Amino acid sequence: MSRKIYIYVLASFIYAEENPFSVFDLDFWNYNAGIVMNFGDSYDDFTYMENRMDLNFFKNNFSAWLQYEYSNPPELGFPIKDLRKYRVEYASGPWSIKFGDIYEVWGRGLVLAQLDDQGIDFDNSSRGYLINYQADRISVTQMSGETVNAQLGSDLRYPEFEFTHNIDATNINFDAYPFSYGLSFLQSNELHQLKPLGVMDTVDINHRLHGAYISWFGSSMDIFAEYVDKQSKERTFQTNFSGQEIEILTPLKRGSAFYFNSNFYLGNWSLFFEYKKYSFDRLSPVDTDYIINNYGNRIDYQVMPILYREQNHSFLGRAAHQTNANDERGYQIELSGGLPNGFQIVSQYSHLSRNDTWTSESPIEWTRKKISGYLPTDNFSALPYKEFYTELNGYVFDNKLQFRTAFGTNKEVPKINRYFEGFSRSITENWQYTDSLWYGDDWFYLDSQLVSIDTMSNQIETMLYQESKSFTIPLDFTYSLNNGYSVGLGFAYQERYKENVKRGNAGGFYNYADSTWIVNDINNPDVFDNQTTSNYPNEIPFQINRMVSVSVGKASKWAITLNYDWTNVQEIVTTDPKYNPLEALVYGDIKYFTGDREKNSAPSFTKNKWVALEFSYNLSSTQRISFLYGSIQGGLVCSNGICRILQPFNDGLKLSYSAIF
Amino acid sequence: MKKIKIFTLIFLLNIIVVFGQENISSGKIPNIDLKLLNGKKTTLYKLLKSGPVLLDFWATWCKPCKQVMKHLNEYHNEFKDQGFKVVMINQDTPRSLGKVKAYINSKGYDFLVSIDPNQQISKKLNGQIMPNLILINQDGTARWRHQGYMPGEEVEIKEQIKGILSSKK
């Protein structure tokens, strides 16, 4: 902390030309500030308090940014009661220098994209320095620093793992309009934690990334392409005869990624196309993108395009695909255009899959076969994902009524437990016994022993995988009245399920999940092994979700919104701890208010339903406060391709306040 | 209960501080580099040479941001002869950055669009809550700020633009 203050004060003193102490006078600076405060307390012990204050100071070529946080605990992540972020910047002519928390994005993030997304507790900034030289056409950036990335484990709120990166990175960008070219290099020494926090079990990894990108801008189209090559090596240290410590690098993994984006324009119509092929680590389907024990692959600095629609409706977000940045290929096409009367139509299609199809030799041994060509496949063993979304939006009734009608559907194979296809054996065992006796209701065999084993050849095909499908219809209407009031109505309907699909020729005792197929040893046909798979993955029965929201607002003053969310079956079953007055009011339950209803246990008719009322008030044009009372369904929340399961919020109060000045 | 007390205390202190600042101009906005959607670059101060500028932060997934954009485009076209410009600063990350230009083109918007994928500009100007409007005088000082959007607020936005243009004369 003291070092940060020294930097800040030193820079301030150096800059103060007349009176060094004038830097402590607010009139000396141009400044702005922002405050965000969030507080929540619910009956299911979901309590948080998150306060952040951002301060920016400017004076000619000098600027500074400070962010103080008092969060104990925050909604997600570790408690902080300290200066969370700081940065000082100085620019002179073509040179600029930054100390502190650095956020950089190069190209489309295949090498480096540093972001702060508090909604999912993601922050990959590096604390260090950055030097940039920018002439007319060329820009050279060199940066160095340290990042500590927290990773959630089994706990839904507190991270259990930390990955520390020390990075050195360089970017050269050359602009020759309409072309732009870039070269990037990043090296990171990572201390990767293998066991939950508090247990010292780590591995040292060296990552090296070399990337290049190009863009071209035309009047009716534009193009962007980026490629990165990445290799990782495990670092170990040995002491030689003279007592010097020597670093030994052992090759670990090597991969690459390619991304292409093009837009075509014709009048008010745009055709958007993007393609990706990410191949940093081809993990078997049972390993998926689990990063704790599978290290040396993509690192958190690589925040790359996801190639499916980033949804802004909670239902569509819950059904979203969780991207696999280590091993995924695919494309996305979106056509959007203006129709008469100011209407806009958007139609989007996305198809993704792994780079390989997989077959299981045994429950833990998988072999892959490369997909031919460049496009994704529909083969279930490559975990395909398909998405279609179309939307019509616009204004009617003299621009008084704004509407959005949409339809979204997707289909995915998120898990595969078993896929065996080929020649194998089943077993018949013969037992011998010397005597038997009848006791109770059963025979007991004495001195039994296995005397022979017969095997039978079988042509086997057994598949067990999970398939999820959903379709969602979100509708939004907002009607503006002449006196500044507006009324909003939102409705969403969703059908969704996840089911286990069993295909093949197994039957009877030999089921698909706990299969007892006798698996041949490929190298030695006379040797066979008896293996069983794991259990079936959890299914979600046919789920129907509905949401209604009604809002009334007065421009620049206040807005009140009632949100009603219900489902027929919960993905993660939770218990409503209390029957609150808002629920009683919405259900018209007079007994609650006459004292004839038990309030500490929710009645059955409130099951699988969440009601929340939010009131927001603009204290001024730069200050806003809101209160939310009620319950919010937990579950999957996706932001930018990263999904987290959020814990539900039942019968509680949320307060939030934001201000800028 | 202790947390509620702390929250209330901090909240009240903020109200006092912020209301105390209500009549104070937040000072000069720093000169920021703007990377435009067509690949060209400019700076805020270059744009201010011809007249006042309204900055707004937005993202393709932000519903109220899209609602206010329609009105901001109208004001950009209505007052551009007086040197006024609207500059929309996009906050999409590289994950969805490719769609920004297609969206703007399909809507037929004429205002300037700058991209800020690492939220560098947004952090400097406290634009994290979207939409977030900053009306900037030609001398680089912030005249008016507004966060969020509710239907009907476009009337106040227009009044503020008219006000800054009339004081320019």
Image (tube, rainbow, N blue to C red):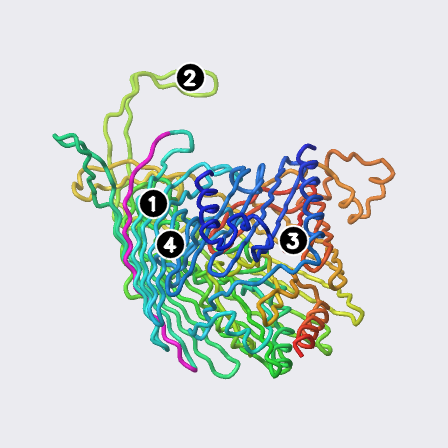
Q: Residue at x 36, y 49 (%)?
A: A299
- Residue A561 is left or right of residue B138, and the answer is right
Q: Do discs 2 and 1 share a chain?
A: yes
Circle 3 crowding by C-alpha within 10 Å: few under 14, some 14–19, many from 20: many
In percent of width and height, residue A148 lies at 41, 42
Q: Do discs 2 and 4 share a chain?
A: yes
The dot on residue A659 is: 3
Magenta span of residues = A200-219
Tag 1 subunit: A
Q: Residue at x 59, y 50 (%)?
A: A25
Residue A624: which quarter of the image? bottom right
Residue A206: which quarter of the image? top left
In percent of width and height, residue A285 lies at 36, 48
Earlier sequence position, callout 3 versus callout 4:
4
User: Is residue B151 a member of the stretch shown in magenta?
Assistant: no
Viewer-closest of A49 and A195:
A49
Q: Residue at x 43, y 74 (%)?
A: B40
Q: State which mark lies toward you, 3 or 4.
A: 4
The dot on residue A166 is: 1
Q: State which mark lies toward you, 3 or 2.
A: 3
